[in-house]
Image: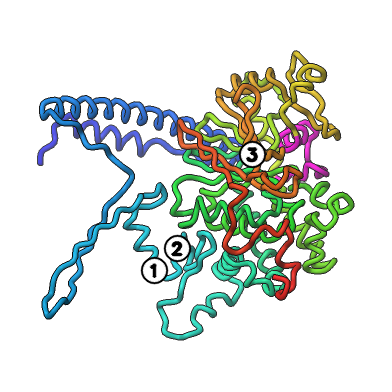
Amino acid sequence: MFLSNSTNGNQLRRRTRDSSTSIPHITSPKTKALLRERDATIASLQKQVLSLQNQLANLSKEQAIQNYHRKRQHKPRQLTPYGTTVRVSTAKSGGRRRQIVQAERSRMGRNASIATSRVLDALEGQRGNSIGGVGMGNGATTTATTTGHPHANDALLQGNSTRAILRRITDMFSSPADHVPYLKSDQFAKDLHRLNKKVRAVLEDEPRCVFLQSPAYVFGDIHGNLEDLHFFSDNIWNLGMSLTAGNFVFLGDYVDRGMSCLECVAYLFAMKLSLPHKVFLLRGNHETRDVNGWEEHYGARSFIYQCQERFGQTVGFQLWNEINETFDRMPLAAVIDQDIFCVHGGIPRPISDPNADGGRIRDILNVSKVAGINPPYEHEEDEYQQVASDCIWSDPASEEQERTSVDEETGYGDSLRGGGAICFGHKAVSDFLAQQGFSYIMRAHEAHAEGVAVSKGARVFTVFSTSKDHNQGNNAMAGCILIDFEKMQVINRSPAYRNQYIHRRDSVSLAMLSEQEI
């Protein structure tokens, strides 16, 4: 093979340029966050270019197909989402052998092909992602096949390794009724303690606003509702999160109101630790000490009460505080495809020039890495505490508020929640989207019987992923939204749906029932 002189010259110049250029090591978290935002912008533009190229290629293919079939004078076959599997077997009949051909027509799902699904089904218990042999799907666990010892699988559950902790928690999520002793044990408290430390380190490495690409599933408030969380596991990531296309964004409010707060937190933390670049846990107003420690208001449904009821006053309080320290490090917002802004409450008021580079996203990125918010730590600056508080507390203004209390110049007004919370109107939404170059806002924070609601000219989506404990009636639905580049799809749980392991006990925690009651 021969190279031209110009090719050799280009390679020589490239090597010389690369060898003479030194790349500085970037240590500033703000610079890293801005670089991540830049990379996300580049990736989004590349994705748009690829989409246009695909559309052009599809148009060319369609034209070629039409020309071909016009010549052949027959209509083309329509593609269908079904696959046909042909099996050939041999059977004896009257001393003769004959072959039997069986054809099976199956619908191909979006998560995995039929062939992949069958291979997974053939592996006993190994459905879903595994880290060191730990099933990370809908709770299904692996089977010890590398050793012939009958108790080899039990041995995997022993010890305090990350593998063992994740295994115990996913087993619990798969069948909580079979793990009531574990949920009440000191082992569960120790697992939560160790899990907290590991997840805390993962969250500390994330910016206050994370940037990701679609496809992505966006979930609203969970509020300790294990039943609805298991519905999403059964129907969205039933093969495991790692085998399910896309990312998973949870918008906060994991605790309080429901009676299975510890179980929900344990499972979501386990997923975050297993898939740190696929699962994103944003912070809600219930991930603050002032709210999840308000036992006088929520009673037995408060997070602090459930911690102390389960593990005693001393250990329970210590565990409650440790989990809140992890909450302090959660991101406040996420941006999908550089186009959709995700947050628990709403858009923050500007504290600097909103038209400057970065705008409100820059303000969020500058919030303290460890923020108590309510109450704040001493190191938190007032203006950035306001930004964080607006992210987790604000609501869209109602039509009445738009007329009476929203400032016409800023688009913001006082919220009916009180306590300094704000609401944002049409003008605030328009200004924010225009300044940031976004199209939509996705948030949680408000209960809706349909699971998903739309407001502000179909630019603000409110997602609520628990169907109970919010006075929405027996027909309330839990919802989430799938964002797949240019498409958005709402997924709701029907009131008639029943899980296989728990049947709507009005949020009564299994851990607080005796085995006879279960």
Dot 1 falls on a residue whose secondary structure is loop
Residue at horizontal 89%, vertical 52%? 296
Type of residue at label 3? Glu
User: Label 3: which residue?
Assistant: 450
* Occupied quadrant, residue 445: top right
Q: Which residue is most to the front?
A: 94
Bounds of the magenta segment: 370-393
Count of labels in the image: 3
User: How far across and down, in percent of the image, does residue 257 sit?
Assistant: 76, 51
Whether residue 212 is visible here, answered yes or no, is: yes
User: Is there CB contact under 8 Å for labels 2 and 3?
Assistant: no
Q: Which of marks 3 and 1 is nearer the N terminus?
A: 1
Colouring scheme, one of rainbow, by chain, secondary structure, one colour: rainbow
Relative placement, left or right, of 91 versus 202 is left
User: Label 2: which residue?
Assistant: 127
Front-lying residue, 445 or 392: 445
Relative placement, left or right, of 407 versus 492 is right
User: Is there CB contact under 8 Å for labels 2 and 1?
Assistant: yes
Type of residue at label 2? Arg
